[in-house]
Image (tube, grey):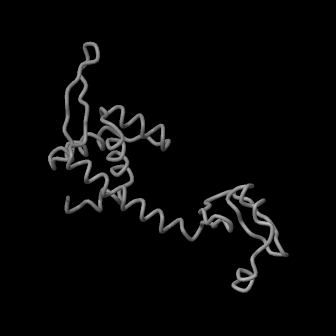
Amino acid sequence: MLEDETEYLLNFTRFNILYLLYEKPRHGYAIMSEFKRRFGKNISPGLVYPFLQELEEHGYVEQQSVFEGKKEKKIFKLTPQGRVLAEHLIERMANILSTALTPKLDVCYCCGAKILEGGVKKVIDGKEYTFCCEHCANSCKSIPKESKNQS
């Protein structure tokens, strides 16, 4: 792994360039276009191409020239080592997001599903409970006595 892999994780743009390549091989313009589509922000070729070159120097990316008509395009593809790096960073990002979101999640009283937004609220025995869907809310008619004592 790179000594500075944390920089890739903490730098939103770099992390997402790596993630876009994890999804599929792309040329530089496709990376910039997809970034703009997803995040509503432009990234400059002056950021994208040096980063791709850095990834290539570390053996994480390889490029291949393809011709579209008379135009040559360089397609960048993660190497097996690059896929390992990307998977590692994606897992770390997922853990960071999970830690950040967990306090904001409701839990369905019936099935235990985590609910980020929405859900169904239902008052049972004078207390409001959250459910993930109408099915769970309707299947819970009363709160078991042991649950009442725990509240």
**Could you say where residue 97 lies in the image, as x and y percent from the top left?**
47, 62
Q: Nearer the viewer, residue 77 or 44?
A: 77
Query: In the displayed structure, would residue 56 be above or below residue 30?
Result: below
How many numbered marks are there?
0
Q: Quadrant of residue 9?
A: bottom left
**Residue drawn at (32%, 41%) of the image:** 21
Quick one: quadrant of the C terminus?
bottom right
**Could you say where residue 11 lies in the image, as x and y percent from the top left?**
35, 56
Report the side of 151 relative to 63 (left or right): right
Q: Residue furthest bottom?
A: 149
Report the side of 64 relative to 123 (left or right): left
Q: Quadrant of residue 42?
A: top left
Q: Nearer the viewer, residue 71 or 146?
A: 146
Query: In the displayed structure, would residue 82 be above or below residue 106?
Result: above
**Could you say where residue 136 lies in the image, as x and y percent from the top left?**
71, 59
Report the side of 73 relative to 147 (left or right): left
**Residue drawn at (54%, 68%) of the image:** 102
Query: In the displayed structure, would residue 63 be above or below residue 3?
Result: above
Quick one: quadrant of the N terminus?
bottom left
Q: Nearer the viewer, residue 133 or 1?
A: 133
Q: Nearer the viewer, residue 51 or 110?
A: 110
Q: Quadrant of residue 118?
A: bottom right
**Could you say where residue 8 lies in the image, as x and y percent from the top left?**
30, 56
**Residue drawn at (73%, 86%) of the image:** 149
Report the side of 113 relative to 141 (left or right): left
**Residue drawn at (34%, 31%) of the image:** 29
